[in-house]
Amino acid sequence: GLGEGAAGPPADFVPCVTSIHSFASAFLFSIEVQVTIGFGGRMVTEECPAAILVLIVQNIVGLVINAIMLGCIFMKTSQAHRRAETLIFSKHAVIALREGKLCFMLRVGDLRKSMIISATIRMQVVKKTASLEGEVVPLNQIDIQMENPVGGNSIFLVSPLIIYHVIDKNSPLYDISPLNLHHHEDLEIIVILEGVVETTGITTQARTSYLADEILWGQRFVPIVAEEDGRYSVDYSKFGNTVKVPTPSCTARQLEEDKSIMDTMPFSPKATIRKRSVKLKPKFTVS
């Protein structure tokens, strides 16, 4: 019959790929080629140009897949904007008295335990201005100086900080009062916090801005850092909470020119600072 008379391949037959007997052996050969294992039992011969072409294409596809996977892993571990999402700003900014001067204040914080190295913060006022020659600048950017004991714009963000700008004669907010604050619809204060992520060494940047209706006059941020048994705890649930405080309803210019305004302010007695032993080393916890 046909089955008995069927002949096998001739003695001089050379297959396209040696040692391929089933789908499993073909699949193993494909894996060996893609990951360049090369056990040596299977190989492409020179009899089939199509097999050689498929081998080249599979090598190229394997390199592309490796490059894409490596790129995805690298981007996942080095995305700076994910770290920037843990740098938070208060929803509102406030204007109140500090050391007898009107100050623009906001609060910044870091939700992660890892530090931001070489953290710096800058503030700019963006508003519509006109020059003496009549030139109108719709988005004029003016840097405003911040008071910082460290010097410059550097901050040490180990706990939430209140960043403030003293409104003096050099400030673009010098002639702003609670009566005309909300009339400055074109006023916007941009805050930029920048630093190096401790774990990856990549620079990250977080930004926010405050419009005129997001600035609260005559209010102050509530304390959120408490000390108990030599340990500082931070209550982030009150991060943006404010309380009303006595604040003159005038511009910084009027306050500087008329010192008698301060005499009419009903200030509360100065708080006392409790001394603690230098042996204690306070640590921070987040609540």
Image (cartoon, rainbow, N blue to C red):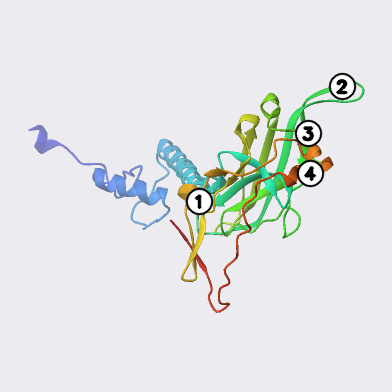
Residues at marks 3 and 4, CA–CA distance in whole angstroms: 18 Å
Q: Nearer the viewer, mark 4 or mark 1?
A: 4
Q: Residue furthest top?
A: 134
| Disc 1, SS | helix
Q: State the image coordinates of residue 35 (x, y, percent, origin top left).
A: 41, 51
Image height check: is 24 above or below 199?
above
Q: Which mark is residue 77?
A: 1
The residue lying at 62 percent from left, 56 percent from top is 269
Q: State the image coordinates of residue 228 (x, y, percent, origin top left).
A: 46, 67
Q: What residue type is labelled 4?
A: Ser
Q: What residue type is labelled 1?
A: Thr
The residue lying at 10 percent from left, 36 percent from top is 3
Residues at marks 4 and 1, CA–CA distance in whole angstroms: 58 Å
Circle 4/circle 1 CB separation < 8 Å: no
Residue identified by numbered label 4: 260
Image height check: is 3 above or below 115?
above
The residue lying at 45 percent from left, 48 percent from top is 237
Mark closer to the chain start, 2 or 3: 2
Q: Which mark is residue 175?
A: 3
Q: Which residue lies furthest to the bottom in this view?
A: 279
Q: Nearer the viewer, residue 4 or 215?
A: 215
